Amino acid sequence: MRNCLLVVVLFCLSVSPAFSRNLEIFFIDVEGGQSTLIVTPSRQSLLVDTGWPDFSGRDADRIVAAAKKAGVKRIDYLIITHHHADHVGGVPNLVERMPVGTFVDHGPTVETGKQAKSLYEAYLKAIGSSQHMVVKPGDKIPLKGVDVVIVEAGGEHITTALPGAGQPNPYCASVRPRANDSSENAQSTGFVLTYGKFRFVDLGDLTWNKEMNLVCPNNLIGKVDVYLTTHHGMNLSNNPAIVDALHPRVAIMNNGAKKGGSVEAWTTVKNSPGLEDLWQLHFAVAGGKDHNVPDSFIANVDENCQGKYISLSATPDGGFVVTNSRNKYTKVYAPK
């Protein structure tokens, strides 16, 4: 027993945020949008999306606070998964508060109309003369010490399996395609991040059929340790064929109190084979007690919240720790 306790203590120390070999991920609460800050062991930073516009810069302030917590003063790469207000809207506010090195996206918005045009023009203005990458499937974000490969962008997906992947997916047989989605959601830029044996996937708001393309008939991604639920845990996404094929140990749901966290998608993720835990940024009001995880795994239990976040610290042996900033509840996931 004493030796077992010693192993646990040593592992916990090894994933302390101050330890230079750790990969850190902050799942920032932007009230039903997305903003995920990734800090590499070499202290480079990758931000995925920026939340909503307006609200007096609320979401940008929360990003800056997370960056300060992580000890970074600039965003080296900013991936905009797609041009919807809850993902790209916060860019102008963010660039007023901290420098961004390179902006990454799938290209121009495919949507028309006044709001779509206004969002995209505000984004281009915020980029200004900064570096700008338009990515396609198979491209990589050049970060040191980690591998970040784009698996979906601009409505296209990788056609060659990632290393170790490519096996036939038995979960495809029970799932049928839906009507095609012509919105920006289906254009989402998604990626897989690998740090040693640790793997994390973020597919933005990719929708049902596009998810299937990545894993049917063969799983081009393979298994992951941590899955950021697609599209805030909406049932327009989180196709069982991809959720089950990814076989995550842990899922993080970036839902809002009244956005995402749908009962159907929540159930798919919660029942996925091999899942050890589901963590949520918010208690989903529509889900009620039966379709939300215990409070210890929820960063914000009240609708009017303080924007608490969930953080993750991973080591290259595949082990990681997840922490709820609201109550400091921490769980260790040992290497497998």
Image: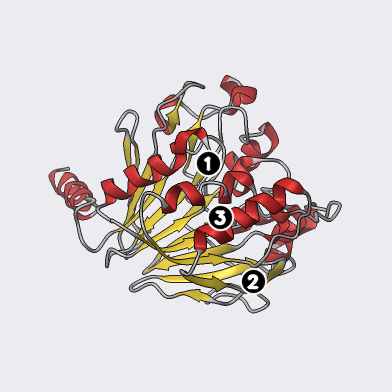
Q: Which mark is residue 247?
A: 3
Residue 244 in view here: no
Q: Position of residue 301 (x, y in %)?
A: 46, 24
Residue 216: where, in percent of width, then height? Answer: 73, 65
Question: Separation of disc 3 and disc 2 at Cα?
Answer: 13 Å
Residue positioned 78% across, 54% down in the render:
112
Give 64 or 305, whichever is nearer the viewer.
64
Q: For this rendering, which residue is in front, 254 or 182?
A: 182
Q: Are marks 3 and 2 in contact (CB under 8 Å)?
A: no
* Residue for point 59% across, 44% down: 86
> How far from the left and from the top, in percent, is residue 278?
50, 40
Residue position marked by numbered label 2 in the rendering: 167
Q: CA distance from mark 2 to mark 1?
A: 29 Å
- Secondary-structure class at tag 3: loop
Which amino acid type is marked by label 2? Gln
- CA separation in Å, label 1 and label 3: 19 Å
Q: Residue at x 71, y 46 (%)?
A: 115
Left or right position of 202 against 9: right
Question: Sequence order check: which comes first, mark 3 or mark 2?
Answer: 2
The picture places residue 6, in percent across and down from the top left corner, at: 15, 48
Other residues around mark 1 within 10 Å, as few (<14) / some (14–19) / many (≥20): many
The earlier-in-sequence mark between 2 and 1 is 2
Above/below status of 180 relative to 295: below
